[in-house]
Image (cartoon, rainbow, N blue to C red):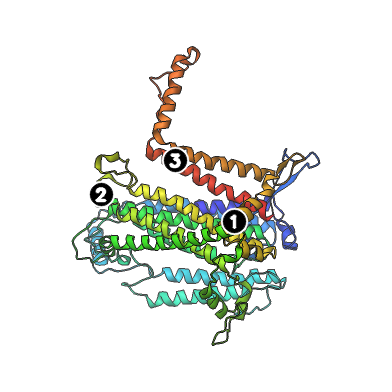
Amino acid sequence: MAIIHLWLSANLFQLGWNANYELYTLNPIPTIPIAHGIWDAHLSLSYDYTIVLSYSAIYNVVCTVGFTNVFQIYNFVIICELLAACSIPLGKLHLISLSELLQWLPFYKSYLFITTTTSLSIIIVQNNIRLNFHTGILFGLFSIAWSTHLLHVAIPISRGINHSQILCLTCNGGLNWIWTHSLYLTDIAHHHLASGILFVWASHVYLSLFKAFGYRTRSVLYIGIHVSSTPSLHLKLGIHCTTCGLITAAINQHIYSLTPYLYLSYDYIRTVALYVHHSWIAEFLMIATFAHKAIFLIRDYTFHNNKGLDVISRILAHKASIISHLSWICLWLGFHTLGVYIHNDTFHAFGEQEKQILIEPTNAQIIQQSSGKANYGISLTYQSVHKSFDSFILPLGPGDLCAHHAIALGLHITAVILLKGALDGRGSKLMADKIHQHYGFVCDGPGRGGTCDISAWDSFYLATFWMLNNSAWITFYFHWKHFTLWQNTLFQFDESSTYLNAWFRDYLWFNCTPLIDGYTAFGANDLSIWASIFLGAHLCWSLGFMFLISWRGYWQELIDIILYMHLKTPILYNLWNGDIYTPVALSIVQGRFVGLVHFSAGFILTYPPFIIGATS
């Protein structure tokens, strides 16, 4: 919490100190948000002072909440800093065990105190008493308080009316296409009020000493006390990563279509930036989920013959059928999706585009038409009552069908690799004692029938590449689809998204042109710095292959040759002391890790300059 509050205060302080927020609030649509001012030596001499644009959508968030001037922002910055300062000692306090806290009491060693606390502990544990029933009330009260803030602060400010005027909650549905192109704030306030009342009511339903909001990990997985007597931090962390990943993915899919922030839909770069940002976070959280659960299975889980009473033992017993079924799905998706793309590319190469395989997503179109989309000509037996949804439901065609199946292929392959590594992390037919080698270990060649790439770490390593590729397919599809919608050239996506060559030619290569022109014979422009970042990220990405492909032998021989030449050179010989340090090549595991970091960092940092250059 301290890190979150400090991060929030730093961003808001930058917004109030070196930005144009007050000018933005006067007319948000034409005003360009500014991050901060700079002096750039790459620009021409006529520019004495220039600015860096803001792509974080923080202007839209602050405007929606109800801030009107920088003094209010500064006050909130001070509040966040105070909360951060309070969170640090509170965090330390929660790390201290109960026994250490009780030692501070003067009557800690008294006989009455010891017998009382011991009896209470036995009663709570044996009777499964729960003391967290108040959690739902906290969620409900915070939701109601936020609804009150929206109703009495944010909505009057957005409408320019007096705070004392009475406002009504609404249930309009859809977006406010007249002004803000976002959800109605009165609808959002209504949602939070209803959710808060529901949470408060639900907490009173569970208001007892034996049932409460939230469940123990043991209760969720049906694990008896005799199966896992010691709590596993890796299991808890894996479950929390799963929850955060699912929440982030849900936010990712709704923040552009059902945006709650005022005027965000007017800004195309920030919309794409938010989508890409949350997409990467969700993907990495899901990767972390499988990694920590694999560590739990290897290090913390103890299997007992309890006749399959817990979920984990049943999953491990059926791991062969789970992995084989997922493998079959991946093969089906891979052959069919890639086969359609190759077929369409072949006939485009021969100039016979009319012979493409174009499959309409009829099931999705029927669902969309039942929700209000009425441009497919599909006759339904009932009349749609959700006409308000027609405005933000995107039309779908054969290109969308191929793209979604390609994304499904990437997701399923990533899942099967991670599941295989986690479920086989304790042992397999090839290596039954794998559990004794822990999470990651170096292969020993053909000595045991070939044990390379079978550890849980190797599965994490391989799945990360598939995750990166899949995230690229998701973001490429989202950006190109919406890019053509914003430019009113949706026909280009419909015609070109059905074969692979068009994805390279019409999307990637064509939209790289602004970045390539960042530095020309006529000088630099405002995209020059992004062009440099684009090239630098490509360098970092390509550097990763040097560690991933060459491996240890090449580097060890190269280092030995350099060391030999140092020892043969009279001048350098005096600068080298082999007794203190001697260069040694990285191991295979270390080299893969270094290569993976460079590959991932370069891969991720390449795309933001591309978005800014293509969309600006």
**Residue density around tag 2, few if under 14, some if 14–19, many if 20 or more, within 10 Å:** few
The x and y percentages for residue 204 are: 40, 77
- Tell which of 155 and 121 is nearer to you: 155
In space, the residues marked 3 and 1 are separated at their CA atoms by 34 Å
Secondary element type, mark 3: helix
* Pointer 2 residue: 430
| Label annotation for residue 349 | 1
Whether 540 is drawn above or below 91: the answer is above
Of labels 2 and 1, earlier in sequence is 1
In space, the residues marked 2 and 1 are separated at their CA atoms by 46 Å
- Tell which of 599 and 491 is nearer to you: 491
Q: Give the side of residue 200 with respect to residue 182, left or right.
A: left
* Pointer 3 residue: 548
Q: Amino acid at mark 3?
A: Leu
Q: Amino acid at mark 1?
A: Ala
Of labels 2 and 3, earlier in sequence is 2
